Image (cartoon, helix red, strand yellow):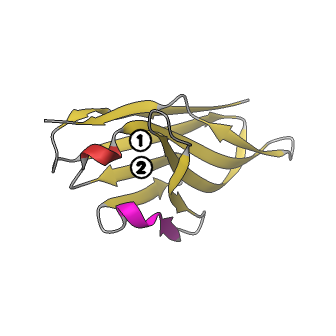
């Protein structure tokens, strides 16, 4: 099957930066869109950023100009560069990928989540 493994979370001061990574592995034929979501305590999970297989990106308004999503199609990895972090960015960040596997079936897959805490 398919696994998504995230890394790069941690504790950072306001104004700081972090880079999240999410690597996909398994019986992958093609990775379509890749996304980053986040969920803060007591809140619903929200879509933060998306990138298509062709590299087109979209962002939620609250992170525009601060976060950058990118992907390496050779490494099957998606990244989220987060700059000028604010306390309200504190959340568990999850990657999601729309993947076609080798038997032809297509599903959404989720990573396990990585904690990002922005605090002084």
Disc 1: which residue = 21
- CB under 8 Å between callouts 1 and 2? yes
Disc sitting over residue 79 in the figure = 2
Quadrant in which residue 112 is drawn: top right
Q: Position of residue 14 (x, y in %)?
A: 16, 45
Toward the viewer: 118 or 31? 118
Q: Position of residue 96 (x, y in %)?
A: 60, 44
**Taking 14 as reference, is 23 left or right?**
right
Please tell me how crowded label 1 is: few (under 14), some (14-19), or many (20+) other residues with Cα within 10 Å: many
Q: Residue furthest front?
A: 42
The secondary structure type at the circle numbered 1 is: strand
Look at the picture and state if 53 lies above or below 119: below
Quadrant for the C terminus in the image = top left
**Taking 81 as reference, is 57 left or right?**
right
**Taking 15 as reference, is 69 left or right?**
right
Q: Residue at x 38, y 30 (%)?
A: 115
Toward the viewer: 34 or 39? 39
Residues in magenta, as a range: 57-63
Measure the alpha-carbon separation of dots 1 and 2.
Answer: 5 Å
Q: Residue at x 21, y 55 (%)?
A: 84
**Taking 5 as reference, is 96 left or right?**
right
Q: Is residue 59 magenta?
A: yes
Q: Residue at x 56, y 33 (%)?
A: 111
Please tell me how crowded label 2 is: few (under 14), some (14-19), or many (20+) other residues with Cα within 10 Å: many
Residue 15 visible in this rendered orientation of the protein:
yes
């Amino acid at each position: 099957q398919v696994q998504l493994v995230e890394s790069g979370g941690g504790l950072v001061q306001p104004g700081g930066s972090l880079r999240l990574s999410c690597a996909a592995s398994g019986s992958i034929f093609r990775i379509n869109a890749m996304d980053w979501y986040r969920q803060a305590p007591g809140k619903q999970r929200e879509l933060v950023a998306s990138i298509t297989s062709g590299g087109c990106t979209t962002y939620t308004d609250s992170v525009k100009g601060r976060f950058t999503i990118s992907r390496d199609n050779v490494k099957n990895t998606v990244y989220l560069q987060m700059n000028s972090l604010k306390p309200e960015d504190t959340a568990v960040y999850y990657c999601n990928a729309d993947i076609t596997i080798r038997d032809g079936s297509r599903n959404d897959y989720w990573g396990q989540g990585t904690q990002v805490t922005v605090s002084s």
